Amino acid sequence: MMKQRIHIKKAEIKDQKLLLYTDETIPVEQLLPGGQMLVDSDQLSFIYIAELNGEYNYVTIHDEFWQIIKDSLDQNMEVYLTNHGEQLQLTSFKDEMAYLIENIKGNSNYGEEMVEKVERIF
């Protein structure tokens, strides 16, 4: 299966939701939320897995957006991927993030920089 990266360019809290914006031309509403997340400690990113036509798409959320993610988690907000007015709810985002954050804290397997940054922000 091919993997396509969807990069987040902007994030904002609006109408009690966290909106993650991409400028990719991918049809957001046709994506299927995977409900799973990965960590890319080399790129200091959390990755949400979505699927389109049997191919994985990695929604890549770099560390510059972690503070707003923390704010949205603290307020128990739902998270949506959006572009050109289309929105897709990223199911299980909050649970996956909570799991990953707890897993990363104090765990040197993720690399010193990733651990330090996650511990500082979350």
Image (cartoon, grey):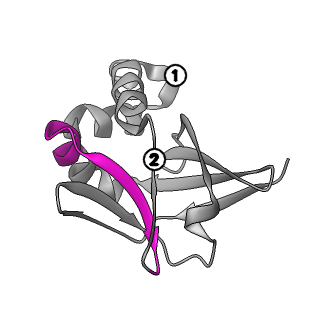
Amino acid at circle 2 = Leu
Residue 76 located left or right of residue 57? left
- Tell me the tag on residue 90: 2
Magenta stretch, residue numbers: 70-84
Residue pointed to by mark 1: 109
Q: Which residue in the rendered view is the most extreme toward the right?
A: 1
- In the depicted structure, whether residue 85 falls above or below residue 34: below
Amino acid at circle 1 = Asn
Residue 98 located left or right of residue 109? left
Residue shown at the point (20%, 38%) measured from the top left: 76
> In front: 75, or 86?
86
- In the depicted structure, whether residue 17 falls above or below residue 97: below
Residue shown at the point (53%, 65%) measured from the top left: 7
How many marks on residues? 2
Q: Quadrant of residue 18?
A: bottom left
Q: Position of residue 33 (x, y in %)?
A: 57, 46
Q: Quadrant of residue 104?
A: top left
Few, some or many residues within 10 Å of mark 2 (<14, 14–19, 20+): many
Few, some or many residues within 10 Å of mark 1 (<14, 14–19, 20+): few
